[in-house]
Image (cartoon, rainbow, N blue to C red):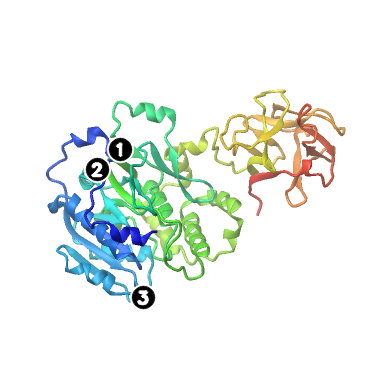
Amino acid sequence: FNQVESDKLRMDRAVPDTRHDHCRHKLWKSDLPASSVVITFHNEARSALLRTVVSVLKKSPPHLVKEIILVDDYSDNPEDGALLGKIEKIRVLRNDRREGLMRSRVRGADAATAPVLTFLDSHCECNAHWLEPLLERVAEDKTRVVSPIIDVINMDNFQYVGASADLKGGFDWNLVFKWDYMTLDQRRARQGNPIAPIKTPMIAGGLFVMDKEYFEQLGKYDMMMDVWGGENLEISFRVWQCGGSLEIIPCSRVGHVFRKQHPYTFPGGSGTVFARNTRRAAEVWMDEYKNFYYAAVPSARNVPYGNIQSRLELKKRVGCKPFKWYLENVYPELRNLHKRVPDHQDIAFGALQQGGNCLDTLGHFADGVVGVYECHNAGGNQVVREWALTKDKSVKHMDLCLTVVDRTAGSLIKLQGCRENDSRQKWEQIESNSKLRHVGSNLCLDSRSARMGGLTVEVCSQSLSQQWKFTLNLQS
């Protein structure tokens, strides 16, 4: 980020109070537990790190912050953290080699003396009364892992901007974190109490509060994950599947500098490290659904992920639920019409694309023709991620299948109810999964007549009108 701009700012600058009005009149319990705040850093700008620490001390009731533990992950200049150690309540631990985020956080947590852990990144600014609502939720139920709404600090000019309160953490099958907007029904349900906790399938990972004993009981972090990346995925799956819950607390706001890239080096490259960490999470927690990750990121299969036996034993010892339970109970949005979860009978799955166009129902239902339309990634008639080629050779959209009207070149394709033994509905992928061939006629799905009447089958050729690609191909 723009360090020159960061260095110009006061260490205790004022930021706008971005909380909902209801939060400003809410009284928090007086007997909340104290917290140890753990902040790890590596070559962080001193001004950003100092502002993070000062905001914790200035914006928190003193009795709720027992200590701030700074873990210096082998920064080039040891003085970066040592100078801050002179401030009251701050303890500095320095790694004697590069350990990465996960192992550094565990070192800080192990040294903590308060009953509750608060993890923060090293480039944050806490807002008014940020800590009390987080501690209150954990004090009521130690299996809750809670996160603030993460406001945005612009990386160029350091302007502090409030984030939407209508977001939850989620992911796609590539297992990259993303923000999901709540559904309209979910937003309507919150109108009566807009500051109620938000159940979230995943946390961003940089900022959260967790009971220390529960953190230890659930296996801390995967200590064989390296540097950074994938740890939020792993801890989110683990908390939910092992009996806990994740929440975003609207009355807690913390600003965060979102950078375009990480300022430190990854041994082996950031992509390889992220793939290794993500693969460890998938292998331990996703059961058979890990195959959908490998279909989305085929190169991940080639990345060694190390020994996971101790994490599998943890999963068994704690009595954690299967990933199927997580999808059904925690992230049901993956099962709606716009994001249906692949079925284990699927060979290929998702949007069926041809260049920038997608197979589209054109609003038709049973006995209607199908066509192509510009991919809009918004569900609707394309119902993105909702076409599947199954092991019984059907190309399905819900309970409808692509059906050849007759077995001659130029024949129209229609959507008809799926029938197990109907030879008109049998398809296979050929030529490195780039074409769909009708089994009975040996003709290929073709879009050349799409504008005039709909998709047809034609004699197989190298025409671009016969090139089709599913979002996910589940055949290894």
Q: Crowding near pointer 2: few (<14 within 10 Å), some, many (20+)?
A: many
Image point (33%, 42%), residue name: 162
Sequence-first disc among 1 and 2: 2
Q: Out of 10 and 181, give the one closest to the viewer.
A: 10
Image point (43%, 66%), residue name: 226
Classify residue 444 as left or right of residue 59: right
Image point (15%, 41%), residue name: 29
Q: Quadrant location of the N terminus?
A: bottom left
Image x and y of residue 292, in percent: 57, 49
Q: CA gap, disc 2 to disc 3?
A: 36 Å
Q: Out of 469 and 304, give the one closest to the viewer.
A: 469
Image x and y of residue 11, in percent: 23, 58
Quadrant in which residue 375 is drawn = top right
Residue 186, numbered label: none
Label 2: which secondary element: helix
> Label 3: which residue?
97
265 relative to 452, above or below: below
460 relative to 217, above or below: above
> Label 2: which residue?
137
Are the residues tagged 1 and 2 within 8 Å (C-beta)?
Answer: yes
> Label 1: which residue?
197
